Amino acid sequence: MTLSIYNTLTRRQEPFTTVEPGKVKMYCCGVTVYDYCHLGHARACIIWDVVRRYLQLIGYDVRYIQNFTDIDDKILNRARQEKSTMEAVAERYIQAYFEDMSRLGIKEANEYPRATHTMNGIQRLIHDLEHKGFAYPANGDVYYAVQKFDEYGKLSGRKLEDLQLGASERVNIEDAEYQKKQYPFDFALWKAVKQGEPAWESPWGKGRPGWHIECSAMVRERLGDTIDIHTGGADLIFPHHENEIAQSEAVTGKPLANYWLHNGMVKVDGEKMSKSLGNFTTIRNLLDRGVDPMALRLFVLMAQYRKPIDFTDEAILAATNGWYTLRQGLLFGYQYGKKLGTGEWGLGIRNNLTSNTYIERFKEVVNDDFNFPGGLAVIFELAKELIREKNIIVHQGKTETPPDKLLQEWQTLVTLADVLGLTAQLEIETISEDALTDAEIEDLIQKRQEARKGKNFAESDCIRDDLLSKGITLIDNCEGTRWHRG
Ligand SMILES: Nc1ncnc2c1ncn2[C@@H]1O[C@H](COP(=O)(O)OP(=O)(O)OP(=O)(O)O)[C@@H](O)[C@H]1O
Ligand SMILES: [Zn+2]
């Protein structure tokens, strides 16, 4: 079976094809930066990270862009509460984002555009919409006229007539915005400046962009008119993604994205985990309590990505137990490779892997709409096989299974687990003989920096992963790269 994925737009599972052969352009709606990331964000980031890694495994060259919404009422409120500025609040939480995601082993996007750095693209798009009759100015604001876009509602399946029926309790007719709109469901592309708020010059007067327009502008600027995959949480289908489609497609006349993918929500007692609702556990809080980042990854990957999942202590405990099992399998080669007499097993994992039945089974199952739980079952089968061998070695001193077979199984396990971002670190004691010095680590970080500058991300990832396998964790932030052992 080749890859087929469920497309929210068509409500069907479809064979995956790309605009350009062998290349995937992928855009993911990122976080609004006014607080630490919670487990809902962790789920979204882990799922799209793994989707990206899997597409790479099956041979695609993936260009992955994720934005930061760094201008928004919630950021301004936070800045007011703290007597700080929007920039300072945004910067702090962007930095925190990178720290948290690095702890979870999320690969960096190719670019992280920010709304405040995209003003020209945003204004150009609004101008084009106005020019084509899809937008109208009103007292310094600019609104999108949803009734002008015939296909409005095609993603979410919501029709304007239905919205109208249920609207009476939701629309506040006293609201200043409402008074400026020609139609209640029109939405703001540009908002006139309010006292004390940051603002940019524009043809419509000083002001700032609405939320939806930033993503349309960033996709257009960084990836072009039509991309292959647009992702985000299911909470964004309406209105955010519906509005992105309306904005982009009205201007270009082309599909914004061929496949729309949405992750299910992380819930707490049946309600969406959310910053606004305040019912959230942050990633750093959970990890600082001692939960292994890999257990959190497993918690996410054990569920089908579109289904909601409940965050409970029991679920994290189950994932942690699963991780301890998998970890034993992943460490097998490091611990017993030498003993089995085939040299240092940790070396050259990446280069040695050829197709085999486990890899084919893994692909077969994951090709069915990114069935990661199914892929995990193959991975656990391998891990358990290696643990069985380990027990034989521990109790009998040796195993009858040929070392080459074990080496291949172990390499397969490490490679497939790596596709899901699941990597095991050796305890410091077990590597003390050949532990790197601080200077050697700094040297490798420098090499990685250079590889990144040269856009050689395969090499930079390789250096990071090799360091990780030696118990060294890298944390990237705006000032550079920090590291710690263990
Ligand atoms: N509970 C959740 N489960 C899964 N994904 C989520 C969850 N909350 C947010 N996301 C996803 O994370 C990304 C960033 O979301 P955003 O910054 O708007 O967070 P939020 O917590 O929903 O914010 P707010 O509470 O202010 O609405 C989006 O793709 C969103 O769909
Ligand atoms: Zn978006």
Image: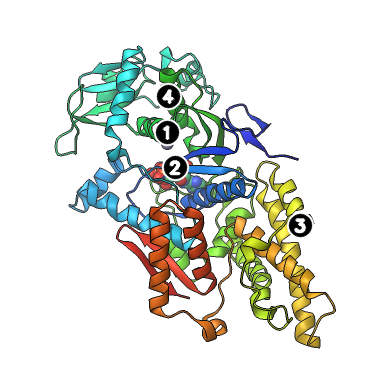
What element does badge 4 sit on?
helix
The alpha-carbon separation of the residues under discs 3 and 4 comes to 42 Å
Q: Mark 2 near mark 1, Cβ–Cβ under 8 Å?
A: yes
Whole-percent x, y for residue 168 in the image: 41, 21
x and y, in percent, of residue 154 in the image: 54, 22
The residue indicated by pointer 1 is: 219
On the picture, is 443 further left or further right than 387?
left
* Residue at 49% over, 50% down: 45
Q: In terms of sequence position, does the residue under pointer 3 or pointer 4 come before the other? A: 4
Q: Kindly state the secondary structure of the residue where label 1 is placed.
A: helix
- The figure's colour scheme reads rainbow
Q: Which of marks 3 and 2 is nearer the N terminus?
A: 2
Disc 3, SS: helix
Which amino acid is tagged 2?
Ile
User: 378 above or below 276?
Assistant: below
With respect to residue 273, does 379 lie above or below? below
| Residue, disc 2 | 65
- Which residue lies under the disc numbered 3? 358
Q: Name the residue under label 4.
A: 248
CA gap between label 3 and label 2 equals: 31 Å
Amino acid on which the number 1 mark rests in the picture = Val
**Quadrant of the image where one finds ligand 2:** top left
Could one spot residue 250 in this view of the protein? yes
Q: Name the kind of residue labelled 3 in the image.
A: Tyr
Q: How crowded is mark 4: few (under 14 residues within 10 Å), some or many (20 or more)?
A: many
